[in-house]
Amino acid sequence: MNIPLRDPKYLMKLPKLGSFHQSKLSFLRSFLSEFKDWQYRRDLFELNDKGYGRAIYSFSKKNKTYSLVCFANEISDEERSDRVIATKWDASFALYDGIPSKEDLERLAFNVPKQEAGRLSYKELTLSRANKSVRIFDHVVENLSQGKQPDTDLLSKVGYLYRTTAVYGSGKFGLADRFRIKNRKEIYGPFRLEMMLVYLVRQFTFDQVNHLAKHKNPNTSVELDLNICRNLGIGNSTGLGMAPFIVNHPILLNNWILARETVLKRIREIEKTSKEEVNIFKKCLVRSLKNVTNWHTESDFQNRKNKQLTEDLEKFIKFLNEDFSFETAFPFNRIYIWAEENLSDECIEYIVSIMMEPYDEIVNPLIDKMSSEEDEHFNIPVNRTIEELRNILEKRYSEILKIDFSKDENNQNFWFISRNKEEPRLASRHDMEGSNLEQPLAIARDIKKLYEAIYTQKNSLKIGKFLTNNNHLRHVVRRAFITEKFPYAEIQDNTIGSQLMPIDMLRLKLSFFGADKFDPRSDKWIRICMFQGAPLPADPEPFDNHWIYNSLN
């Protein structure tokens, strides 16, 4: 059986993309699989009795070492903020390439706590900062100091002790440019260094609460139970700064989606499943239900989605138990078709993720294909013709060409860059000034403009000649020719319309990171949890390949 890949015009709609969940392709999971055999060490831990100071953690293998340098800082409650524009944080971090010298450590101590106001070097790979979830952090320290473990029901509602507010890399603020390190096999997967930083920060949070509890009451304190540690992650607050990334990196977006769709296609083409494969699928499905029921949010939007997901999962499990047999031919194809006919997008994409769990041999070869060399496709083929371009637009963008941008609701918003922090923002063009500063992120509208501009042009006209008089359309001409080769490169939706939910764009990217428990705080920023359930760096337990479905319950 040859199952086609899902149609981009169906898949690449924002509500659909905003229903994606983590999977075995997610970057934090592929990072852990790659580094599970590396030697982990805590090389330095110099915190005072208030928990302030510095620490270093590292992963090493053969002649390679990556070191996380941590600085725990004293700040007041009034100075603590999740805003990216904050200037002070409870802790700040840099991932160092190798083993830092004393001189490096002093240089980093001066610069890293300042974050954007500091200056890093090519020796540093990533940079981040984080704030305590104060209520949970203090609860854990207080209980441990009294010889008790913390309340796991309370912990499960939050899922972490610290929240990061940004993780920077790829040359920002003087960090190493990607070209220096991109060919290292162990970090070839997207955002692997960022995932390493977050993972080691997680361990720092456990060591810090243990340290504080011991200093608070040396005679009675206990350390945080390892099982509780495993089931705590790292939080993150993310705003609109993440949304333009998936528009500005079309080939990378294609490669992420294409890997996922290729895995789905190959699983649906499996004619017979083994008992072990079926057991893994069912086990992960059942374990995952605890994650759903522990997914707490105050967002009405997300609670409606969660409620629908829970109801759909109950319906799906009933179908598996009463009306389905894995003895049938192509069982996962039957499951997928049934899901399409009976379930919401949220649950369909949830099941797609769980279908991957038994199939390392299908998933793993595609992980290395999720990076991209986008500059190789930057040049516009100027000798192609208007006829060829028109055919691409009509084939690849047929849904977008139907949008009437003369209507206010289809042209409501504009994207711009804030003056103070140079961060992406979204505003109503009918209520605010500044649309003259609009960023080129309204791809659907600009594709429509391009189509209208070439509609009356001669078929034989060369693209290069067309662009001499239409330079303002160069960015979408380039995108059209990219989409010709990379079918999932484009969001097939209107990113400036009145129905836009920006968090769909955030969630798409975060799902590939491996984030869980999405908690929208508005339609423009969201809190998430990462690495909840993950093994510890020096875990005495065997590595569990399906750790993401662990739960505090």
Image (tube, rainbow, N blue to C red):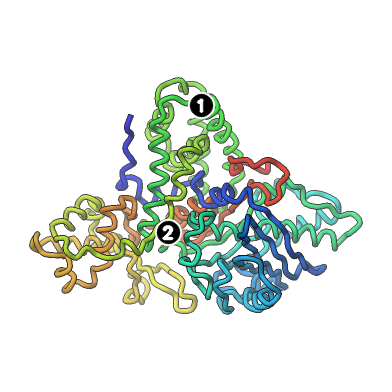
Q: Residue at x 31, y 76 (%)?
A: 436
Whichever of labels 2 and 1 marks the residue nearer the N terminus, that label is 1
Which mark is on residue 318?
1
Residue labelled with disc 2: 502
Of all residues shown, which one is farthest toward the front? 63
Image coordinates for residue 472, horizontal then vertical, percent: 24, 72
| Quadrant assignment, res 96 | bottom right
Cα separation, mark 2 vs mark 1, equals 34 Å
Q: State which quarter of the image contains the C terminus.
A: top right
358 to 247, vertically: above or below = above
457 to 326, vertically: above or below = below
Determine crowd level at label 1: few under 14, some 14-19, many 20+ residues with C-alpha closer than 10 A.
Answer: few
- Amino acid of disc 1: Lys
Residue in the foreground of this view, choosing between 85 and 427: 85
Image coordinates for residue 433, horizontal then vertical, percent: 36, 76
Q: Are marks 2 and 1 in contact (CB under 8 Å)?
A: no
Q: Residue at x 86, y 55 (%)?
A: 221
Which element is circle 2 on? helix
Q: Can residue 491 be seen at all in this image of the molecule?
A: yes
Determine crowd level at label 2: few under 14, some 14-19, many 20+ residues with C-alpha closer than 10 A.
Answer: many
Image coordinates for residue 273, horizontal then vertical, percent: 47, 26
| Quadrant assignment, res 194 | bottom right
Q: Can residue 515 be seen at all in this image of the molecule?
A: no
Q: Residue at x 59, y 78 (%)?
A: 118
Image coordinates for residue 179, horizontal then vertical, percent: 46, 66
Of all residues shown, which one is farthest toward the right? 219
420 to the left or right of 376 = right
Q: Residue at x 52, y 70 (%)?
A: 176
Which element is circle 1 on? helix
Residue in the foreground of this view, choosing between 322 and 127: 127
81 to the left or right of 507 = right
- Amino acid of disc 2: Pro
